[in-house]
Amino acid sequence: MMKKKLLSADKYPPRCSYCQRGRLSPDGESVLCEKKGIVGKDGSCRAYKYDVMKRKPARQAPVETHNPEDFEI
């Protein structure tokens, strides 16, 4: 049986901007939903379906460089 909930639902709460049924409007301030019409980016409804490809991952921290002197005894 497949799980219906996202494994880390606390980390990624339902938002219209991540929904399969929503498209970002040209102005970027709202979402055009197939079910509800024009809604805010932070809204959600019962028809919410998570789309993995719409979420942009957080930027990773830059890798620190080490000097060879750090490894000398």
Image (spheres, rainbow, N blue to C red):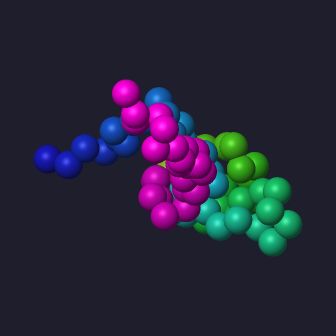
Whether 63 is drawn above or below 51: the answer is: above
Nearer-the-camera pick, 51 or 55? 55
Q: Residue at x 37, y 27 (%)?
A: 73
Q: Name the magenta segment's main secondary structure.
A: loop
Q: Residue furthest bottom?
A: 26
Q: Is residue 59 magenta?
A: yes
Residue 15 in the image: state x and y as whole percent: 60, 45
Nearer-the-camera pick, 72 or 32? 72
> Is residue 53 left or right of 16 when viewed as pictured?
left
Residue 27 in the image: state x and y as whole percent: 85, 66
Q: Residue furthest right?
A: 27
Whether 51 is drawn above or below 12: the answer is: below
Q: Residue furthest left?
A: 1
Residue 39 in the image: state x and y as whole percent: 74, 52
Residue 49 in the image: state x and y as whole percent: 46, 54
Q: Residue at x 70, y 65 (%)?
A: 24
> Is residue 11 left or right of 32 when viewed as pictured?
left
Magenta residues span: 49-73
Whether 53 is drawn above or below 60: the answer is: below
